Image (tube, rainbow, N blue to C red):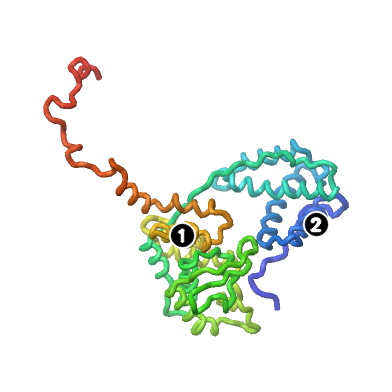
């Protein structure tokens, strides 16, 4: 019996299955990415972005990669720049960059494998994207408000509370939490993330409160949800199956929305990840420790949170800046004759 919720097989990219046409070459390129060790979510992102590019080409009767020239690729780049979403907003430069990178790599591979004589994308200048701050970060009170949303008198409520606590305590990515197996969380207070982003394993601390909620879920709830044969995943849906990434996002977003935060902040799994990193920095955690917990390959990615963690910077500013404190008399009206403009200047307005 097929597993419910499993993604449907996508149709092949390209309308022709002939030598030199898009379909076979793109399929071979994606297969090469898998063989090279790229994760399946990464390959799926490549596939999605290449599908959009190939569809755009075929709409212009460009049925083979050999028919694509550098001006055509630059024209596609302009198309992305001027494209508007349904709400009228332009694509961010980060999104444009993400859509062009697979195209550049595809033509690099086609040239290297001698399917093309020259690479039309070799000198394409990719858009630069700005380092964006997280749209929202919760304070400690708001985070607790979100964690209190699940109804812990129900089995699914206990499960959801354990999921939220795990996100908040460990700062895991959603695909990392979905990939947790039953014994990846240790009673000693650690969680083992296997094959996280970049196919890297790491061990992160998990707080005592989150650990107790996970233990409660495993002992009281999971046996009621599991369907044999046991898939081994730690967190299961109400159908007894491992979560899909999008399903996990919907679950967290539902509880964030139900919290009805006064600030109007919204988000899902990544909101709790941002919140965890920011609050730990504000409490004095070293940025390199945060880097290790979040699994960032570069410290530059973690330094983003130093801009979000403004509370600590405000405290340092108030304590050390010589002009940070306001003296009350500075706002008082100036005494007679003090600070007045000369008569010839006061008459001009």
Crowding at mark 2 (Cα within 10 Å: few <14, some 14-19, many 20+)? some
Kindly indicate the quadrant of the structure image that contains residue 337.
Answer: top left
- Regarding residue 56, the answer to whether it shows in the image is yes
Q: Nearer the viewer, mark 2 or mark 1?
A: 1
| Residue at the extreme left of the image, as rendered | 336
Residue position marked by numbered label 2 in the rendering? 28
The residue under label 1 is 277
Per the model, the C-alpha gap separating discs 2 and 1 is 40 Å
Residue 326 position within the rendered picture, expressed as x and y whole percent measured from the top left: 23, 42
Q: For this rendering, which residue is in front, 96 or 290?
A: 290
Quadrant for the N terminus, please: bottom right
**Badge 1 density bin: few <14, some 14–19, many ≥20, Cα 10 Å:** many
> Which quadrant, please, contains the C terminus?
top left
Q: Nearer the viewer, residue 142 or 182?
A: 182
List the single residue furthest toward the top.
344
Q: Nearer the viewer, residue 142 or 200?
A: 200
Residue drawn at 56 percent across, 81 percent down: 225
Q: Residue at x 77, y 47 (%)?
A: 108
Along the line of sight, the residue nearer the viewer: 196 or 161: 196
Question: For numbered disc 1, what is the local secondary structure?
Answer: helix
Pointer 2 or 1: first along the chain: 2
Residue 67 appears left or right of 276: right
């Amino acid at each position: 019996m097929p597993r419910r919720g499993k993604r449907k097989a996508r149709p092949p990219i390209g309308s022709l299955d002939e030598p030199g046409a898009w379909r076979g070459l793109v399929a071979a390129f994606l297969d090469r990415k898998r063989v090279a060790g790229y994760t399946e979510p990464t390959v799926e992102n490549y596939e999605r972005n290449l599908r959009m590019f190939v569809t755009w080409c075929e709409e212009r009767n460009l049925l083979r990669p050999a028919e694509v020239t550098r001006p055509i690729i630059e024209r596609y780049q302009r198309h992305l720049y001027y494209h508007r979403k349904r709400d009228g907003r332009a694509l961010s430069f980060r999104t444009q960059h993400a859509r062009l990178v697979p195209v550049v790599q595809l033509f690099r591979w086609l040239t290297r494998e001698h399917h093309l004589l020259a690479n039309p994308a070799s000198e394409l200048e990719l858009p630069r994207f700005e380092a964006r701050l997280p749209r929202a970060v919760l304070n400690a009170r708001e985070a607790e408000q979100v964690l209190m949303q699940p109804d812990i008198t129900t089995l699914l409520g206990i499960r959801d509370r354990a999921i939220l606590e795990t996100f908040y305590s460990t700062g895991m990515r959603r695909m990392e939490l979905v990939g947790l197996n039953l014994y990846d969380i240790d009673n000693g207070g650690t969680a083992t993330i296997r094959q996280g982003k970049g196919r890297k394993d790491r061990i992160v601390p998990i707080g005592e409160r989150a650990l107790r909620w996970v233990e409660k879920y495993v002992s009281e709830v999971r046996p009621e949800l599991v369907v044999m044969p046991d898939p081994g995943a730690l967190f299961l849906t109400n159908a007894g199956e491992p979560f899909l990434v999008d399903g996990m996002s919907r679950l967290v977003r539902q509880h964030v929305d139900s919290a009805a935060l006064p600030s109007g902040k919204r988000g899902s799994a990544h909101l709790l990840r941002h919140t965890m990193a920011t609050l730990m920095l504000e409490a004095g955690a070293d940025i390199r420790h945060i880097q290790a917990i979040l699994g960032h390959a570069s410290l530059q990615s973690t330094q983003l949170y130093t801009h979000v963690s403004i509370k600590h910077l405000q405290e340092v500013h108030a304590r050390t800046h010589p002009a940070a404190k306001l003296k009350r008399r500075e706002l008082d009206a100036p005494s007679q004759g003090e600070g007045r403009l000369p008569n010839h200047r006061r008459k001009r307005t």
